[in-house]
Image (cartoon, rainbow, N blue to C red):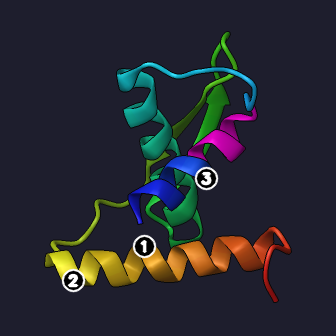
Amino acid sequence: LDAIIYLIGVQELGQFHRSFKKDEKINLMHIAICRLLEPYGYYAFDYFDEEGWPHYLVKEPLPALKAGEQAVLMKEAIVDYFIEKDVIQ
């Protein structure tokens, strides 16, 4: 699951042909989580910074979920993202 989230972060950043430092990889996962949960009303896109990184605003705090519930939410959000991007039908 983490690898898919990381790759979605790279996709959303759009900087495919470069290496990322450890802290940047964490930021990429954060970008992906924000983007994945945006349609659910938890985040809203705000702006791109001078380096092209997207920034999001928290619209609604995430509910307290157990680990299994978090995984289900993220898997559902990933499937929705892939459908939106026409990766799957």
Residue on which disc 2 sits: 68
Q: Which quarter shows the N terminus?
A: bottom left
Residue on which disc 3 sits: 8
Q: Position of residue 33 (x, y in %)?
A: 46, 55
Query: Could you say which quadrant of the image residue 78 lies in?
Result: bottom right
Label 1 to label 2: alpha-carbon separation: 10 Å
Circle 1: element type: helix
Task: Estimate how packed mark 3 is, as few (under 14), some (14 to 19) or many (20 or more) residues with alpha carbons within 10 Å.
Answer: many
Q: Residue at x 81, y 68 (%)?
A: 85
Label 3 to label 2: alpha-carbon separation: 21 Å
| Residue furthest top in the image | 50
Main secondary structure type of the part rendered in magenta? helix
Answer with mark 3 or mark 2, whichever residue precedes in sequence.
Answer: 3
Position above or below: 35 against 45: below
Q: Which residues are magenta?
A: 8-14
Query: Could you say which quadrant of the image residue 69 lies in?
Result: bottom left
